[in-house]
Amino acid sequence: MSYKSLFPASICSVLVGVSSWSVEAQPAPWSEPESVEVIEVHAQRRLQDIYDVSVAVTLIDGEYLKQRQIKDSVELAALSPNFIASNAAAEGTTPAFSMRGVGMFDYNTSTVSPIAIYSDDVVSGGASFLSSQLFDLERVEIIRGPQGTLFGRNTTGGAILLMSAMPEAEFGGYIRASAAEQRHYRAQGALNAPLSDDTAIRFAFNWQDYQYSMNNVFPDAPAAGMEQASFRLLLSTQWHDWDVLLRLSSEHWQGVPKPVYSAGIFSDLATGTLCPISLVGTRDCVDGFGMSVASDDYWTTAVNTAEKRNRTDSWGASVHLSREFSPEFSLKSVSAYKTFNRTHFWDADGPGQFIEGLLGSNTDFFSQELTLYWDQGKRFWTAGLFYLQEELEQNNSLDLFRDFRVVPELADIPAQFFYDNTLNNKSMAAYAQLDQQLSQRFTLTAGLRITDESTRYRARSDLDTVAFFIPQLWDLSGRVSDTEWTGKLALNQRLNPNHMMYYSYSRGYKSGGYNGGFASSAEEAANSAYGPEYLDAWEIGSRWRSDNGRMRWDLAAFYYDYRDQQTFVNFSSGVAPYHVLKNAGDGQIFGLESEWRYQPSQQLELHVVLGYIPTAKLGEYREGELFVADTRLPFTPEWTAGAAIQYQQSLRQTTLLWQLGVDYQSSVYFDQYEDPYTRQAGYSLWHGRVGWQLTADLELAFWGKNLFNQEYTELKFDSIAALGAITQLRGEARQLGVEISYHF
């Protein structure tokens, strides 16, 4: 019998055996001490005391997100251990997430990230939906580790739950407005109104207009920045014993993408002498065309972005139905539809026109999920069905060495590839999880999920050169499909009312597919299909709190065993950029994490998070001349850490709230080669805020990000073969701002 068949059989035997075990004679569980606040989370698709959950989860209050000026889902990574994120190829492309070393550093719109976002129970789908504006949220939960049972689809790395502030029975709302450096303006607010005894509506909006820190000195280059406008409308009501929630949302972006920074690596182009790494990015170094950077100032560049624009439009609607048929039995249905349209022009070469292109995508998404909850006292069942269909149309182009077209001796080199790819993804799943109380101290969790996924693709390309135009340079199609079992076994041990431990095994899986990225030949396009990956995850965790609840400490240790790991592989030897998602062998990840919170008084609170991943080994991969073995996983720092202090001070008839914190990540590589030229050294970003509560409803605040003007990059890309340079996207400089908010 194979390993794959043993896994579902063993889980099924546990489910059947445990459900038939009578526990009526067991003593009642401990009750929570009256003086200790009970923290509840949705990490298992229902509201539970966090001490009853055998998964690592970080809970973030919506008000704290506003205070920290957390703009979007990418910035959430700073709030959780062993979690980093980046706008990998500039804001307006698909972001990159990495959680415990499991992630996808790929800007391609066809990518499905192993970390999913669930907005009010609706899964994100493809990578285009990962970048989401954050506003008017009740809470956020960051769940780390494979979600092999209750959360689909493809959440081998973890899940991020975004929960909106819901309509309430009382009229009210708020308005916030802020202004900051880099011409940053933001307004957001919400209006809540009851319509009847059982019906209420809530409208929330978010608008911001800002420029990036990079100063582009190229002649006639427009100032780079983005304008974003979002809204969300929620209507809650009751209909024939059903609780109904209708949700409508929309996002609109437009602007000029952040300019890249092209840093040459040669100190002497004639001899091919390389610059020391410490000087790369200064005028002492030149690229393959003899050009140096425009200035030694870190946030100054020269990029030909005259016609580069981004426009993104998306909207979505969902219907949530829930009904309690009895105190023991309830049902929930979530139906969702989303559409997404983006046009993003990019430039990767600095002042020239050597490597430029267009990322265009149109996505239609539909999902349906039914979840059943059955409470039998000491036994709780969660079961459901899940369906997803997503159709993606890509309209991409890659323009190579356009400046050579006017040079007769070089006119044979330039080429422009046009890509029209279509992908149709389907996912169907059935799942069940049992939480069985075995005794006063022990609760067993056993879950099982079967998932069937398929991707049908058609990849087409036209080629334009100075001499000729070739339609349908390639036109290929195919299908990737797989059916897999995943699940979880966990034991929750309550040592005493204030201390618990959990021990878990999870099996995660991410389906295969087609990476519809840039290619320069039919062989490269055909090579873009990839197979599924598998992840066996072992974890032990602990939650402890003091008797008075003022101190809490969560710990976790995990070991991941990868098979056929999907890795973004950069082929850096050719003049055309070629990078593709491949199954790069077997890998291992080992790590630790800690979250500590202490409130010695009502006025003072301390919070420290720490993540440590000493082992994050990429499996062996060989293709032609490319060979990679035993390197560290890209975009996986060894250390992540965060610390924050908050102090509330009474001042006559007003209150001051002081906040100061720092976020740190150690060095990372952005591809599999561990090239020192593409290494980002470790760095720390400090943030702070002073809120002045003038009245119960009015607050004036001063805030800052990157207080010490730390220099760092969001991406370093190996463009040495094509340009003799390292292409960079640099992070944002220091930003100071002021905000006023009013509640009514």
Image (cartoon, grey):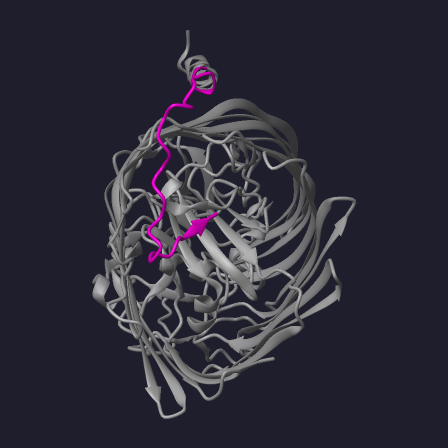
Residue 41 visible in the picture: yes
Q: Quadrant of residue 522?
A: top right
| Relative height, residue 372 to residue 58 (above, below) | above
- Residue at figure coordinates x 79%, y 44% from the top left: 240
Place of residue 139 in the rendered image (x, y in percent of width and height, measured from the top left): 49, 58
Characterize the magenta stretch by its predominant secondary structure: loop
Q: Which residues are magenta?
A: 17-41
| Relative height, residue 256 to residue 18 (above, below) | below
Residue in the foreground of this view, choosing between 117 and 294: 117
Query: Total marks drawn?
Result: 0
- Residue at figure coordinates x 31%, y 48% from the top left: 636
Place of residue 408 in the rendered image (x, y in percent of width and height, measured from the top left): 56, 59
Q: Quadrant of residue 673?
A: top left
In this picture, residue 517 sits left or right of residue 299: right
Residue 407 visible in the picture: no
Residue in the foreground of this view, choosing between 132 and 324: 324
* Quadrant showing the C terminus: bottom right
* Quadrant showing the N terminus: top left
Place of residue 493 in the rendered image (x, y in percent of width and height, measured from the top left): 30, 34
| Relative height, residue 615 to residue 269 (above, below) | above
Asked whether 39 falls inside the magenta stretch, the response is yes
Return the residue found at the far bottom. Answer: 652
Place of residue 657 in the rendered image (x, y in percent of width and height, measured from the top left): 36, 80
Asked whether 498 falls inside the magenta stretch, the response is no
Residue in the foreground of this view, choosing between 63 and 26: 26
